[in-house]
Amino acid sequence: MNIKKSFLIIAFIGLAVTSANAQGLLQKAKSGNVRSMYELANQYYNGVGMLQSYKDAFVWYKQAADKNNVESQYKTAYMYENGLGTTQNLTNAFNYYLKAAERGNEKSQLKVAVMFDQGEGTVKSPARAMVWYRVCAERHEAYAQRRLGDMYLEGSPVEQNLQEAAYWYEKAVAQNDTPSMACLAYILSCNQSVRPDYERALQLLEIPLANNDPMAQFAYAELLDKGNGIEQDRQKAMEYYVLAANQGLSLAKEMNAVNRYNKYNDFSGFLDMDVKKFTRAESWLILGKEYQRGVNLKQNTKEAEKCFKKAAELGSVEAINELSLMEGIRLNKKRR
């Protein structure tokens, strides 16, 4: 018997054995054996022992999932999410991910966190997202650690806490998460509740700057602008502020708006911004003055006072003086 014939015989026997195994698995699945349902679905999904069929795979994954097989719950959710073998349905995907997540499936836990975070397949809930991110972060999931850092940095859905943000970013940086490097560098250079470390901030910025990360561009601009840990260069700082703003970073857009107002008396940069995202005393001070003047904004003394109070809380001496003047005017009116 030549080699070619031997090979064909072996291949035929292998195919027959595989087919017999598949038939046996099919019979067990039809009789209600949950593990066989899952294994049969895997074979259809991967095209092992039979032609690949996402449609048949989905049918068997879902049957096993509805009998509480956790691996099948994850796969059913995945197929619903991506429209494999069934019509895409994010609500159904979320529901199956949640079932698997509650039973400890790690991939599903991260999916549930992201879907709560982004409002995909369920009502957006940053608070619930945070709960699931923490579960994932505590088992060293870098993306979850970064998102916890983001939430503490942004102050939503919890109060801003830069020390807690730095803690989670450090965890993610230890796993070489590039965006976390940029955010940690910003915290170490922003002169707020965390002790500044300009040298480390500059080191952390090397990789994210090379990747055009907007937070890295902003943090680098801040260091250049103030001459912290690096030679002061305000022109170069402006270039990096613009780069970050062009990528949509609200911190950079706010800084650009302040710079344009101070340099050209141009208020337009503030008009398309969400005031809830203002982080600088100078921004609130400018807004307060504009409400007082009634030129770029409709004159409104109450709103002006609110803005001055925000600026004062952020340390603006000029805002404190403005509030004192407003209080003096009120007292004079009462005396009359």
Image (cartoon, rainbow, N blue to C red):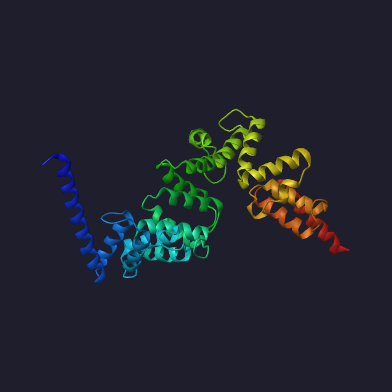
- Residue 133 falls in image quadrant: bottom left
Question: Does 25 sit left or right of 156 as displayed?
Answer: left
Q: Nearer the viewer, residue 207 or 230?
A: 207
Question: Does 323 sit left or right of 200 as displayed?
Answer: right
Q: Residue 209's x, y, as percent?
A: 53, 35
Whether residue 315 is situated above or below residue 199 in the rendered picture: below
Q: Is residue 195 visible?
A: no
Q: Residue 50's x, y, as percent?
A: 28, 57
Q: Residue 214's x, y, as percent?
A: 57, 41
Whether residue 162 is situated above or below residue 21 in the rendered picture: above
Quarter of the figure that contains the C terminus: bottom right
Q: Residue 99's x, y, as percent?
A: 38, 66
Q: Is residue 99 visible?
A: yes
Report the residue that reaches farthest toward the left: 1
Quarter of the figure that contains the N terminus: top left
Report the residue that reaches farthest toward the bottom: 31
| Total tally of numbered discs in the picture | 0
Q: Nearer the viewer, residue 61 or 277?
A: 61
Whether residue 200 is situated above or below residue 253 in the rendered picture: above
At horizontal 59% and vertical 39% (from top left) the residue drawn is: 218
At horizontal 19% and vertical 48% (from top left) the residue drawn is: 11
Question: Does 188 sit left or right of 108 as displayed?
Answer: right
Q: Nearer the viewer, residue 268 or 284?
A: 268
Report the residue that reaches farthest toward the top: 231
